[in-house]
Image: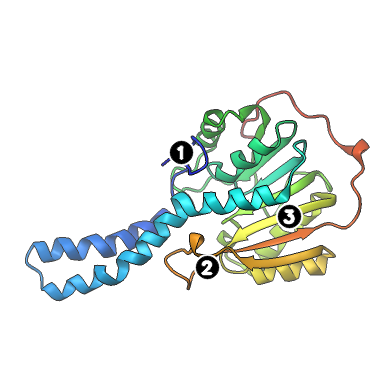
Amino acid sequence: MVGAAGKGRYGVDAPGWLVALGGSVVLPLVAVAAGAPRWLLRIPAVTAAPAGLFLHASVRGKFLVWEELLDGLRLRGDEQVLDLGCGRGAVLTAVARRVPRGRVTGVDLWRSVDQSGNRAGTTLENADRERVADRIDLVTADMRQLPFEEGRFDLVVSSMALHNITDARGRGEAVREAYRVLRPGGRLLVVDILHTGQYRDLLLAAGARDVTCADVGHRMWWSGPWVPTRWVRAEKPGHPDPSERPEPSTETGGPA
């Protein structure tokens, strides 16, 4: 699958759900063709639209949304960026295109249940296809316990990843870790389904400013408006100290 904004192959999100939705369309048609009662045709008439919306969100809609969100950040081009749950690199590479003098670190546990074909090697291949491999590092780590010092990044992003942590305590740990590794003046942008109100409240409790939350609209409906996607944006108070910026690495990143 080729991303809407680039040359990488980014797979599909939650492949199990997509297979289930697709099966609900195809299997009744096959059954009726084999002689089953025609009333089964009512099932794909209902499920075709949700399956199409899910597929659109995964292979096109999320790319369009993220292009707009990243453009809205008006990045300088030298930022140090962290992508939590980077997967095959759709957002990772989109950010990297915007920071030619910076560095983007992707963190993931590489679980294919969350994204089809989710492997560090695939992410590096996509970075190479997008011609941004020289500014990307990959780290195998849990979002709840990041192996980075406090105040390391100018920007932390995450797309459709935090909800994969099934318990509220774990999601809270991930949000607090994301905030911890932000520099003063740094920004956080999370796009997710479910739990976005929890993320907002946690960031407010941590002292973040300009915390906002909004629906991204129909382009990321995961089967329909009953499974919407929202973004949460926040900033860490303070002013960054340019003298504390690490020197950009000249080596191509790889999984740790």
Residue under the point 44% across and 42% down? 117
Question: Dot 3 corresponds to which residue?
Answer: 188
Q: Is residue 20 left or right of residue 132?
A: left
The amino acid beneath tag 1 is Arg
Q: Are marks 1 and 3 in contact (CB under 8 Å)?
A: no
The answer to whether residue 218 is seen in the rendering is yes
Q: Is residue 204 left or right of residue 132?
A: right
Percent position of residue 157, x then y:
67, 51
The amino acid beneath tag 2 is Pro
Q: Secondary structure at mark 2?
A: loop
Farthest residue, direction bottom: 39
Question: Dot 2 corresponds to which residue?
Answer: 228
Between marks 1 and 3, how big is the CA–CA gap? Answer: 26 Å
Mark linked to residue 9: 1
Say which quadrant the C terminus sits in. Answer: top right
Between marks 2 and 1, how big is the CA–CA gap? Answer: 24 Å
Residue under the point 78% across and 56% down? 179
The amino acid beneath tag 3 is Leu
